[in-house]
Amino acid sequence: MARKPVIAGNWKMNKTPDEAVAFVRELTPMIGEFDDVERVVAPTFLALAAVAAELRGSSVKAASQDAHWETSGAYTSQVSASMLAPHVDYAIIGHSECRAFLNETDENVNRKAKAILAAGLKPIVAVGESLEQNEAGETVPFVRSQVRAALDGLAPDDMSRVVIAYEPIWAIGTGRSASGEIADDIIKTAVRDTVSELFGMDAAEEVRIQYGGSVKPENMEEFMAQPNIDGALVGGASLVANDFAALIEIASRVKGRRSANA
Ligand code: 13P
């Protein structure tokens, strides 16, 4: 069964609402035809409703950069998955920047994943090791533990709606990326095999796994050519319409309908 590639632009703390709307107006005509690739943009919370309104009727989807697990209540600064549901299809959780700056824990990532699924949305669960862990040879056990914790208590059926993004922290915003082959190997052994142990082989075949970390048009083909990499979670290059459109075009050519083996 072919997994549909999913390319998501994580805008992080960039673009005001006006800039965000102008950007999607420029972007959507460039990527509108690539419906063999899921195309997702994740603006800040402030710009999200305006971007979602601009995207209505288009095949490009919106994502939030977080989602709280409770539906409402005394959680200053937070936005719940159920509040996001009318505006987005996806919610990114567990990003290493949130783990580092906001004390995001594995336990909270798990709560958020459950709430996002319950709200009818799809979580994009980010995992990945630090440079120290990588150099100490701890990547696979560490990423496995993050995946196990994030997916604890979910059901095999949920895996068709879960996306996991493997983002080595040392590759984020550094211009230094993992090689396609190494990323594919870690994604297979640390992520897909863990999903298989937890939920069975069918679920592991179905779950989509992205690579993230300094993805750009120049290295996109190398990642998309890998059998276990089903897309990309993109920071810097997603802020430039031509670059993001080039990533979508490459994903479609290498992995989508336009690929020779599709
Ligand atoms: P860069 O593409 O800027 O390295 O960021 C990756 C990332 O953190 C996406 O979530």
Image (cartoon, helix red, strand yellow):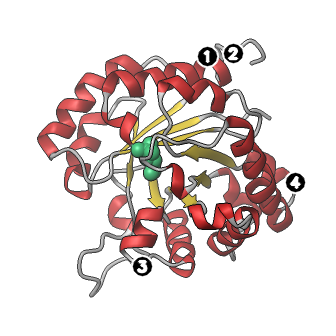
* Amino acid type of the residue tagged 1 in the rendering: Arg
Under tag 3, what secondary structure? loop
Disc 4 residue type (three-letter): Met
- Residue receiving disc 2: 259
Q: In the visual, does 11 lie left or right of 253?
A: left
What is the crowding at mark 1: few (fewer than 14 residues within 10 Å), some, or many (at least 20)? Answer: some
For the point 75% across and 46% down, the residue is 206
Mark 4, secondary structure of its residue: helix
Q: Quadrant of residue 110?
A: bottom right
Q: Position of residue 125 (x, y in %)?
A: 55, 60
How crowded is the residue under tag 4: few (<14 C-alpha within 10 Å), some, or many (20+)? some
Circle on res. 253: 1
The structure residue drawn at horizontal position 37% and vertical position 40%, both measured from the top left corner, is: 236
User: Which one is nearer the viewer's eye here, 61 or 232?
Assistant: 232
Q: Nearer the viewer, mark 4 or mark 2?
A: 2
Q: How far is mark 4 from mark 2, CA to CA?
A: 25 Å
Which is more N-terminal, label 1 or label 4? 4
Q: Which residue is mark 4?
A: 201
Q: Is residue 169 visible?
A: yes
Alpha carbon separation for disc pair 2 and 1: 5 Å
Residue at the spot of label 3: 103
